[in-house]
Amino acid sequence: MQSGVFHTNYAKDMQLRPTWVMRARLIFLIILLVVLPFVANAYWLNLANQIMLFSITAVGLNLLVGFTGQISIGHAAFVALGAYTAALLSTRLNIPFPLDVPFAMIVAGAVGLIFGLPSARLKGLYLAIATLAAQEIVLWFLKHLDLFVPNVGESISLVPTWAHEQFLANRARADFNYYWVILFFLTLVVIFSVNLVRSRVGRAFVAVRDQDIAAQVIGIDVNRTKLIAFMISSMIAGLSGALVAHYRGIVNWERFTVDTSIAVLSMLIIGGLGRVSGSIYGAIFVTVLPALLTQFGLLFRDILPDVNRVIPYVQQGAFGIAIIFFLIKEPEGIAKMWKDVKDYFKLWPFSY
């Protein structure tokens, strides 16, 4: 009896889904994603949209932190740049969605490239502090945006164009309509990221992460590789920001504080650094956990009248405990746990 997977040629070895089990799981996932918006209520559909938006942001950050090894705790700033760029283009120049998305990505990518320049000389904690400084600089700029753009407050309300109004003609179905839009962009980001890490550039990312001196010895331009990682990561963050702006209909800097950056970074820690799928697992965990605790509080509000006041603290405590658990028990996150399960069945019955 054959135990394991054995490839007989390079073409089959390079396939993303070489076995029938992998293809079956992919088909099941596609069916689940297609059926979900038709059976979920408004609350859970909104939660699904939030998960996908966080997933886009987390995948971009994972390319920088997980694959290239460049720590960043200011990623929410680039999401904010994408959101504000899309909002200004929509309100001031009447550029409709999704034509403003590429501009949001370019602005966020350019700023990310500038703030990525210190990565050529900084590492570890020093680089983390530099990205934190980038976060505060960008937020200061957005708070005082009226100094650079006249008649703009700290919040920008998007006025839908005619095409956008037609798309959201039934406001009750806005979450349903946006589900497909966000899912489309998430699919593009995942496909791009998975293929990027398999390319020459992606292998250079991993080489710089593992040992930058050795990478330089074998001919990799380390500084150029780091800047490319910062730029691509920031562009994906800008894409996420543009989607957030149009989905929420209002842009405010308070959505993009350092707390948001820490939350996205924790998604990678919980989901799995250096794995594209880990970004999505982490986004699901971090988004669904508070929602489940909130629902739990609603179930017992008649028995425990003060439970609603305690739930926010329980959410923060559970969030911290989860991070500590994964750091101690499974540093490679949920993605590694899922891989262990798949490997067990892949090698069964000769799992040894």
Image: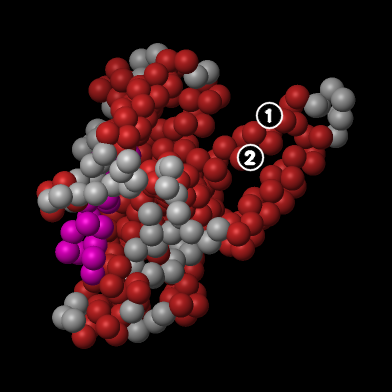
Where 115 falls versus 252 (above or below)? below
Which residue corresponds to the image point at 75% horizontal and 40% vertical from the top-left?
Answer: 311
Q: Of residues 124 and 28, which is closer to you in this image?
A: 28
Provide residue 266's location: percent of width, then percent of height: 53, 56
The kind of residue tagged 2 is Pro
Secondary element at tag 1: helix
107 relative position to 159: left or right: left
Q: Which residue is mark 1?
A: 295
Start-end of magenta stretch: 185-204
At horizontal 32% and vertical 30% (from top left) the residue drawn is 24
Task: Answer with left or right where residue 333 lies relative to residue 102.
Answer: right
Q: Residues within 10 Å of mark 1 (few under 14, many from 20)?
A: few
The three-letter code of the residue at mark 1 reads: Gln
Which image quadrant for residue 326? bottom right
Question: Where is mark 2, residue-wise?
Answer: 290
Judge whether residue 228 is colored magenta: no
